[in-house]
Image: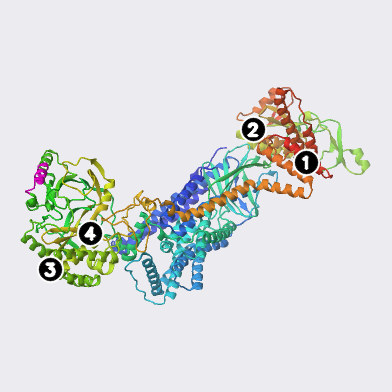
Amino acid sequence: MQKTNYPYRITYALMILFFLFGTIFYRQSFLAILLILLIILPVISITLAYHAFERFDFLLSAPVTTVSMPENPIILLTVKNPTFFPFLNCELSFQFQNMYFPSGLKNTIALPMEARKTWTLRFPFAVSQPGMILFSLDDVKLTDFLHFYTFHKSLNKGLQIPVLPREIPVSFVPAAMHTEAEDSEFYDPAGSLSTDIREVREYIPGDRMQDMHWKLSARMDDLLVKQYERSLDDSLLFLPELYKEEIADTLQTLYAVSMKLIRQKEVFRIALFHTDVMEFSQAVIHDPEDLLQAFLTLYYQKPYDTPDLARSTYQSVFPLYGAFYQIHGNAIDLTEAA
Amino acid sequence: MNQNLTYKSSTEYLKLKKRILILFLVWLVAVFIFICRYAVHSFQWDTMPLLVLISFSGIYLFFYYLYQKKQSKEAYAIACLNKNHGISLEDIQTDVPVNRFFLCFIRGILIFMASFGTITGLVTAFELSFHWVGVTLGILIVSMLAAFLYYNKFSFYAGYVAIFILFTIFAFSLYPYINSGFQGFINTVFQKYSDFFYLSSVREANELIANRYLTVSITMVFVGLMMAILLNITISAHMNLIETFLITFLPLQIALYIDRLPALPYLAMLLAVYITVGILGRSGHYHMSLNMKKEPFFSRRLKKQTTQYSYQSSSRGILMLSIYSIAFCIVFLLLCNSLFFHGLSSREISNQLKNTTDSYVKILVQNGTWGFFDRYDSTGGLNNGRLGGASSVNPDYQTDLEVTYVPYSTDTLYLKRYIGVHYNNNLFAPDYDLPQSIPMSGSLTDENFAKMEIRIVDPDVNMPHYPYDTIHASNETVSSNLSEYSFMDEPETTLPFMESEAYTEAFQLWNDTLADYENAPVQDDVWTYEVLYAPYQVLINYPSNPAITDEYEAMVYENYLEVPEYLDEVMEDFCAEAGLTAILQEADNAATYEEQQQNRLRIAGVLKMYFTREFPYTMSPGTTPRDRDTIEYFLTEQRRGFCAHFASSATLLLRHMGIPARYVEGYCIQIDDLTEAEAISNDISGWYIGDYALNETGLVTVNVTDGSSHAWVEIYLDGYGWIPYEMTPPAFGDTIDEIGIMAIFSGLFTPVQRLASGANNLTEGAGNFNFPTFSFMSSIDFVTTPLLILLAAVCLIILFMILRRPIHQQYMLFHALRQKDYSTAVILSYQELVQKLQKKLLITDPHPVIRDVGSFLKQAAASEAQSSGSKSGTSIDCSFIEEWTRLTEKAAYSPNPTTQSQYEQYRSFLKNLKF
């Protein structure tokens, strides 16, 4: 029962009284007709609304499940009224938010449920920050034709769409690569690669010459490259800071660096700081899919108000681990072990 | 995230600023032009419209700015909220576009139905014929024109101008037809009202063109145009039920008020429009912005931290609802017509509210709106001899006088205050130069004396009132104002009684009272005085009054036979019409003095009978036209009225026939009024001396209201004096009208029946008989029958909804057993059990598997056995539930059919379950 129904009920009761008054005192047939009509209509109105309300159907879908900025997510809501009666007093409550910037703002949409019709609403969003976009359809209300009664039902339907940051040009060069790349057997910025060969594959322009498997290439009459099993402990490790004030830039920088490294076929790690339990996990990134999973994990973490919290926590938890790159805002700082 | 942008630097504000600045500059130019003109030509009245226009446009601009600023701020706030949270929702889109043409068309249909239903319904109710096709097409076209004004911004502004031009051309070119059609309609309406109310006269308007078929048709289209424009605002713009109802229902009242019901199709149209507009108005999906290009599918507004999106308009929804409404209304009206409303008539009901409305309607029909403007205030329709200026008697029922006295007979006690002597120009004026004394009349037994205390409560009553045969009054000791109007003359009136012992006793009593008054403080707001009078009884054989001198009688014949010359012809005609002339000739042959006096009373009696027979009493006769004489108008055309009309006319008629008479106003206390009187004491000593006609009596105080105000005639009997004579006939149906909160219900509780011109027992001032029969139910019997049918239908529906499932199940079970399909019978029994358990909330799963139900039954049986076993020590036996489960699963899943014995076994299991 809604408060908003009371004015309508009172108005209706006054109308009935008015017509009853007129009918008794003036005994007019038309007034009597209107009076009886007024008495009948609420029963019909509420019964039909109840009949239809149980049959309404709502479906959420998204044409694109993952979005990279500057693309914008779109959510489709399909509503269906299989009954023969149109209801123009249907109201849906929904929320949408970036989980990093929870708004708590409520939205309602009043839409007509046309008879025996399925129609689709398109919710185009404009996102300015990366993060997990959460769209939830909370509940539905249907008020009968005369606003006598409002039926209410929780829907609790939701949809999440991760929005990856915009890929910006980044000039990140790992420190070790910068100093030792020309001389070393293979690039080893933060440790060493393993000597175990994981696989041998065809040459792709950009592969290092020292990785060429010359013997096999000669035999197979094709250029083949050795893909080494990298020791994960020695791979690049990035630690993004989810500091609230810089989180958008941090994610953007991490994404840009990650994409660059992926294109360079580097395997690297991202230390994921679980802010709720103050623990770390590592995501090994081989390709964009790994990166997406890492970002999904990041998107579920709660940003914090203390700068460098992840770094200090990491250093205190793993004091003997090697160097890592702390990403905070647009900066990438090589941080040595404590 | 910080909000770097302020509202004043936002694009929303800049846009608004630019728009307002342009408008403001335009306005400034207009002001400048006006000032220049003023400077050159000085102020002239012809520039007044321009000044008004500029002023209003300035005010409009100001409010437009405020409104736009509010809108702009709201839009900015939504944008900020979304930007701050990294995500914003753009305009929601849908695959169902708003079809503006279709929307306008549906609205046009609604407007057509409302205007056509009203106009045609009204005209057909009065049985006027018209060109059906032409009127239908005409109203349809103007309705569509009006509806399509909202198609876009251009059509809105240009269309209104076009419609105004069309309207003007239409009105001017067809003015004679429109006017004649309107007058023809009015004449028909007045005629029907006259027939309904049995009115004596009907106003008739002049029809320039006699072809009513043509003129009415043209007028209908013209009125349809006006109505379509109005309804376009209430429907297309506001979708407001109350406005639509008022525009369409009020004109229809002209027919409905006198039980003229429009034909069903028109009523169905109107009802369908009411339902559709009511539903759409409450849905919020009727809106159609004029700004077609920028119109989003959904409007957006921020309210209490909630962004509300609303779909603008649903053309398909509106169409479906309209169709359903029409279909529903047709079915409903057909049902109503065939079931409920035979014999429904407002004639059969009478109550204060209806009677009052009737009286005003009659005034309107007979006298036009001027009838509402009475020319003077009146108490109970009376105003010191003024006549014809009050259209109806509307007493306030507040106490005017409090009269304390000893009732002595069942006769009406008259308290007179005003004597009209000379009649001229609708006024029975008093003549204070004449002796106002009252030579005693009636049965002046020298043994009867009574005292009466009169307390004037209502300050508007500014004259003293006296009973007949007053001997003394103490008013001079109370207020000097009263003496001015006093017609007491003690020496003359007391002469016959001076020798009486009873009088001496009474006079002693009187002197004591006077002494009390002299010592009492004088009250300014309430006049109280005492009267010593001789209780009056009319007897034919009476002694002559020695107080009447020859001089007095000469004065009477000189003054109280006066009739204005301009009324002689009217009087003559009326006397002939009423048969009084012949009686008068017979009376002239009377030989004796007694016969002459008795003939006077006989003539008065015949006159009263004629009035009773031919002149219906009414409290709302309407005012006399300004250029007419009231008595002439009453006797010739109006021929209906209240006491003042009868008394004044009778006075002049009697005078015309040579009988001295005068017009008297005052109050009358009837025997019925005593039922509501306050009993003071059974001891009447000091208040009454002598005999009385009643078996028992006592001292009472009667509250006299202006409902008891009255006018009557005094007839002079030679040698005896003036006697009051009641000329007002009994009223039939017309009651004293008052619209009070409770008074309006009065008619519902009394068996007042409305007859042709009324037939009631209630006579103003001459008999008010109340029947205590409770007739409320009979007043609403026409509503109770359909309501009871409706209630029964609702009960049946509810009963059906409750029993639908069990009945269906039982039928299915019966069917299965008949077909010997025992597997289905088992399943149906199982479903019945599950529903029972779900109903008792013992199982919450809506679709439980058979095993789960079996487990539940086992648990229930175990707990049952445990509770009983603790007492009796028996072990738990759940084997039958295992068997029950097996049988159910077999019936549900096994290809082998269940046998009859298995089904019976299954049923016996079910009987063992106790829930």
Which residue type does callout 3 highlight? Ala
State which mark lies toward you, 4 or 2. Answer: 4
Q: Are marks 4 and 1 in contact (CB under 8 Å)?
A: no
Which residue type does callout 1 highlight? Glu
Q: Give me the C-alpha separation between circle 3 and circle 1.
A: 116 Å
In the rendered image, which residue does mark 2 sit on?
A: A302
Which residue type does callout 4 highlight? Glu
Q: Are marks 3 and 2 in contact (CB under 8 Å)?
A: no
Badge 2 element: loop
**Residue A226 placement, left or right of B484:** right
Q: Are marks 3 and 2 on the same chain?
A: no
In the rendered image, which residue does mark 3 sit on?
A: B591
Over which residues does the magenta segment extend? B498-509
In the rendered image, which residue does mark 1 sit on?
A: B904
Output the chain of dot 1: B
Q: Give me the C-alpha separation between circle 3 and circle 4.
A: 27 Å
Q: Is A157 situated above or below B143?
A: above
Q: Are marks 2 and 1 in contact (CB under 8 Å)?
A: no
